[in-house]
Image (spheres, rainbow, N blue to C red):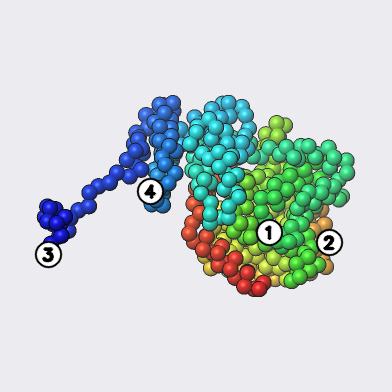
Amino acid sequence: MAHPDTDRRPPQPKHATPAYRPGPLDRLPDAAPEMTGDPRLDWTRAAAHLAAAHALPAAMGDSDRAAVQRSCRAVRTRFLAAHAQSVYDELTDGRRRHLRLDELAYAAAERYPGLAPTREQIAADRARDQAGKHGWELDQGILFWAMFGAPEAGRHLLRAMLRPTRAATELAAEFAGSGKAELATVTLERRDGVGHITVRNERFLNAEDDAVVGDLETAVDLALLDDGVQVGVLRGGAMTHPRYAGRRVFNAGINLTHLYQGKISFLDFLLRREVGYLGKIVRGLDLPDAPYGHEKPWIGAVDTFAIGGGMQITLVLDWVVATDDAYFSLPAMREGIIPGAANLRLHRVLGTRHSRQAMFGDRRIEAAGPDGPLVCDEVVTPAGMDAAVDQAAARLRGPAAVANRRMLRLAEEPLDLFREYMSGYALEQSRLLYSPELIANLERMWIGRARRSA
């Protein structure tokens, strides 16, 4: 016998099309408003979309939330593509103020609500591991893609990042008197006109994280500011790790433990590293009395290995001395990230084919092997390292070395070339930082480490 409710229903087709149900996107203004060329009018339209998205109920499905995020990022991208220079000029008072990366990012968040994440949003995400973050740094990637991509804004921002840090200016007088600076993870000592910078992140084999990058920038600033330093040297300190106890290690790359824990910052590590201490090694400091940059030659003393970020550092140094048991490698592809500015610089050292093998094939280069001369200038025994560094420093003293390194840089890496690279890097690296591949790689690394220590 038929159910009475069924008898009252109208006949249904076998493959009825479900009725359309409005979703969160239907409550938002146009996600792709036409840019008029008027920054105020265009921001009014973009802000309306971003504000409406912010007002949506917090409880929505993952697919709806992702769709809203994509819509907002499309709006941010369109607005910044049209008006990055105008936004930058407003935030920097017509380029009269020199804002660092973080200062610029949070000034943008305050002046243009919704255009960039706030300091509070980023801080909240820092309390989560990488897999559990909301991904606000993706929007910082869009912001700096646009800022570096606008020629005048990008050049001004790069020069702003070449100014001495506040920490260095506060320590400069003390260092000038004592010749020593003890930072949390880095030490600097002036000896016979040479500024010896030593990384001492022993727990992590001198891997770099936010703290190390900050300390390295301070130390590089101090060495460049000090009139008694003519040449800088970068070296890793001796390890306490059982496998390398008592041995010096140059650099183990990015701190993967901190990356897994969500402690590696897009701004304060991935961007700051390239345009901060590495940028200052390449171009020197931007000072009022040094229109071409206040720079000095730099030597790298590579003990044991230079992995990932360690190999990236050697690409910006004027002379590299390595021990005969050392090796170089660039495993960023395996980790799931871009190896800083190595994509811009590595081919000048290895050539195009070998560069791809190093990046895509995780090729390891032995300092004492046949390809060693491509990545280092001298190979010595561990016992001979100190003497080799002293001899290299003696050769690199004087104005001729500075003038020649400046001319080499103008030929190899003009500022606009680097600026354009950083624009693309900001966008691509921010995406990779939240890619499923990176998260999966970190999970495998963490699980494998837990099993080995069990």
Label whose residue precedes the other's in the sequence (3 or 2):
3
- Give the number of the mark in front: 4 or 3: 3
- Residue 1 tag number: 3
Label whose residue precedes the other's in the sequence (1 or 2):
1
Label whose residue precedes the other's in the sequence (4 or 3):
3
> Marks 1 and 3, Cα distance to the nearest angstrom?
76 Å
Front in this rendered view, residue 374 or 209: 209
Label whose residue precedes the other's in the sequence (1 or 3):
3
Mark 2 Cα-neighbour bin, 10 Å: few <14, some 14–19, many ≥20 = few
Residue 93 in the figure: left or right of residue 12: right
- Taking 386 as reference, is 18 above or below it? above
> Marks 4 and 2, Cα distance to the nearest angstrom?
63 Å
Label whose residue precedes the other's in the sequence (4 or 1):
4
Label whose residue precedes the other's in the sequence (4 or 2):
4
Q: How many marks?
A: 4
Instruction: Say what secondary structure mark 1 lies in.
Output: loop
Q: Residue at x 74, y 40 (%)?
A: 167
Find disc 1 in the rendering and name its residue: 207
Q: Residue at x 63, y 60 (%)?
A: 257
Residue 239 in the figure: left or right of residue 354: right
Residue 354: x and y, percent?
Answer: 55, 65
> Marks 4 and 3, Cα distance to the nearest angstrom?
43 Å
> Marks 3 and 2, Cα distance to the nearest angstrom?
101 Å
Residue type, numbered disc 2: Ala
Q: Quadrant of residue 419?
A: top right
Residue 208 in the figure: left or right of residue 396: left
Q: Residue at x 58, y 64 (%)?
A: 331
Residue type, numbered disc 4: Asp
Find disc 2 in the rendering and name its residue: 387
Find disc 4 in the rendering and name its residue: 64
